[in-house]
Image (cartoon, rainbow, N blue to C red):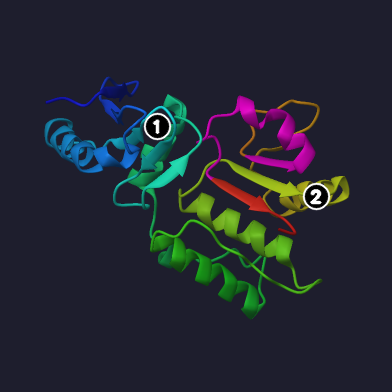
Amino acid sequence: EFADYALMASDGKPLAIVEAKSTNRDALAGQRQASDYADRIREIYDVDPFIFLANGREIWFWDRGRYPLRKVSGFFTRDDLERLGFQRKHRLDLATINPNGQIIDRPYQLEAIRSVAEKMTAGHRRFLMVMATGTGKTRTTIALVDLLMRARWIHRVLFLADRRELVQQALGDFKEYMPNVTRARVEQGEVDDTARIHVATYPSMMQVYQGLSSGYYDLIIADES
C-alpha cells in the first residue's frame, strides 16, 4: 500500500504524507496507517516525514518524536515544512544554553525561562507567564525568543499586543536587545516575509492571517493574554 498523498521537498525526498479519509469517517482513524507509511519512508529515504490526517472537515498535524498530534486549520507550505525539518534536525539541547545575561539577570526571570525550556523539551506547546507590572515580562519574553533562536528551535515569531503603544514599545525592545534579528510591524494589511520577528495588534493581524499558512509562525506570543 501507499500513502494517499506525499508532499515532496525541494531535494525530491518525501517531506510529509497525507492520510485522507472520507468526511463520514474520523480523520484520526488513519493515524496508525500513516505512522506505518512514515516508518517505511524513513527506511527508504532516511527521512522522517511529517504527517497530516484529514477527512475534508478537519486536519491534524503530527511531528512524530517532537510534539503530540494536534489539530490545525490548514496544510503547511513546503517552506514551512522544510523549516520545521531543519529545526528538528539541527536544534540544540535547551538545557545546554543559558539565557542572555544582557537581556535578563533577575533570578525569577531566569527561572521562568528555565521552566518554559524544560516544558518545551518535554513536548509542551502552550505556556502562561504571569508576572507583576514592572517585573520585566517583555524582557523575559525577548530573552526566551533569543534563546530559542540561538538553539534553532524557532525561526519566525509573532508578538501580539492589544494596543498600538504596546506594539511600538515591543518593537523598540526587540531592536534594543536583539539588534541583529530582522523585525517588522504588521499593519495596513502587509506582512514582511523577510523579517523574523513580527509585532502586531490583534486588529492588524485579523486583516492578514487568512493569507498566511497555518505553519507560518514557530512561536506566537500574546501580550496581556
Frontmost of labels 1 and 2 is 2
225 horizontally vs 193: left or right: right
Q: Which mark is residue 162?
A: 2
One can see residue 197 in this view: yes
Q: Which mark is residue 187?
A: none
The image quadrant that residue 83 belongs to is top left
The magenta stretch is: 197-218
SS class of the residue under badge 2? loop
Task: Name the N-terminal-most of marks 1 and 2.
Answer: 1
Q: Which mark is residue 82?
A: 1
Q: Closer to the camera, 202 or 170?
A: 202
The image quadrant that residue 60 belongs to is top left
Residue at 51% x, 54% y is: 148
* Image x and y of residue 25, in percent: 31, 34
Above or below, 105 against 9 in this view is: below
155 horizontally vs 22: left or right: right
**Other-residue count near label 2 (Cα within 10 Å), few / some / many at <14 / 14–19 / ≥20:** some
* Image x and y of residue 128, in percent: 61, 65
Furthest residue to the front? 24
Q: Closer to the camera, 99 or 12?
A: 12
